[in-house]
Image (spheres, rainbow, N blue to C red):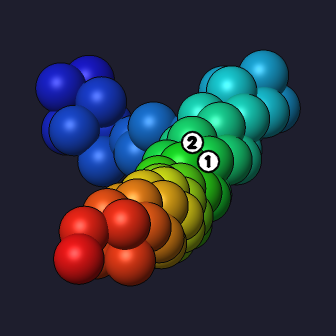
Amino acid sequence: MTEIRSRIEPFACAPGLRLESHEKVSKLQIESLNERFSRLEAVLERLERRLWLAVYGVAGVILAEAFQGVMNAAP
């Protein structure tokens, strides 16, 4: 009897297979979401750099015009 039990291989039942496939799909979805979040973070960082560059550019123009006004007013 023990010889027969040692030869019997476990079989996969339908609910077990469904659970396993659901876990695989969930894992793939989570990996995909993490990849998308990483790409979004990179895009937001680039956008933030561009925004700060624009802010510094505008501040530079304002300061240059103020400096030019002071230079024109002084004899």
**Taking 5 as reference, is 37 above or below it?**
below
Which residue in the protein does label 2 denote?
30
Residue 33 numbered mark, or none: 1
Nearer-the-camera pick, 23 or 17: 23
Q: Secondary structure at mark 1?
A: helix
The residue under label 2 is which amino acid type? Ile
Marks 2 & 1, CB-CB < 8 Å contact: yes
Q: Secondary structure at mark 2?
A: helix
**Taking 2 as reference, is 22 above or below it?**
below
Q: Position of residue 15 (x, y in %)?
A: 78, 22
* Quadrant where the image shows the N terminus: top left
* Quadrant where the image shows the C terminus: bottom left
Q: Position of residue 49 (x, y in %)?
A: 40, 65
Residue at image position (30%, 48%) is 7
Please give left or right for residue 25 compared with residue 2 in the image: right
Q: Position of residue 37 (x, y in %)?
A: 54, 49
Residue 24 numbered mark, or none: none
